[in-house]
Amino acid sequence: QVQLVESGGGLVQAGGSLRLSCATSGRIYTTYTLAWFRQTPGKERESVAAIRANGGSTNYADSVKGRFTISRDNAKTVSLQMNSLKPEDTAVYYCATSSAGLDSTTWFGLSNYEYWGQGTQVTVSS
């Protein structure tokens, strides 16, 4: 059983930076996919970024390309470095894990992920 716990959320001014971390427990195989999603009230959860558990290929939503970086810091942690934050980045951010090796055509599908964290709030003020 995989468990995920997010941390690092908070309040930041537009243009600032935050680093989110996701601590994982349980067995994560190198073929798994680790990802970040986000959700605002009244909207569907949307994909942000994903990385293979071996630290290999990454994928990003167009809205965060060039500003956010996902990384596998060690065997137990996946991080999301968020720079040049905008008010529209305000959301609850969720860490997720898929036992499948997802690619550029499948990584953004919520139904592909079996394990989810509880989320951490990110608020960007203008």
Image: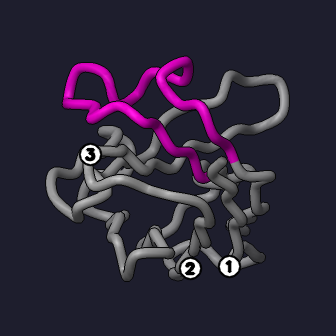
Q: Tell me the kind of residue under disc 3.
A: Thr
Check disc 2 and report its element: helix, strand or loop: strand
**Label 3 belongs to which residue?**
31
Residue 3, given in percent of the width and then of the height, sits at 69, 56
Q: Are marks 1 and 2 in contact (CB under 8 Å)?
A: yes
State the image coordinates of residue 63 (x, y, percent, origin top left): 38, 43
Amino acid at dot 1:
Gly
Residue under circle 2? 18
Q: Nearer the viewer, mark 1 or mark 2?
A: 1
| Camera-side mark, 1 or 3 | 3
Q: Position of residue 84 (x, y in %)?
A: 43, 72
Question: In the image shown, does 76 or 80 lie closer to the viewer?
Answer: 76
Give the vertical position of 117 relative to 121 (above or below): above
Query: Alpha-carbon distance for marks 1 and 3?
Result: 26 Å
Q: Secondary structure at mark 3?
A: loop
Q: Earlier in the sequence, mark 2 or mark 3?
A: 2
Q: Amino acid at mark 2?
A: Leu
Q: How many other residues sit within 10 Å of disc 3, few (<14), some (14-19) or many (≥20)?
A: some
Residue at x 51% of width, y 81% of height? 17
CA gap, disc 1 to disc 2? Answer: 7 Å
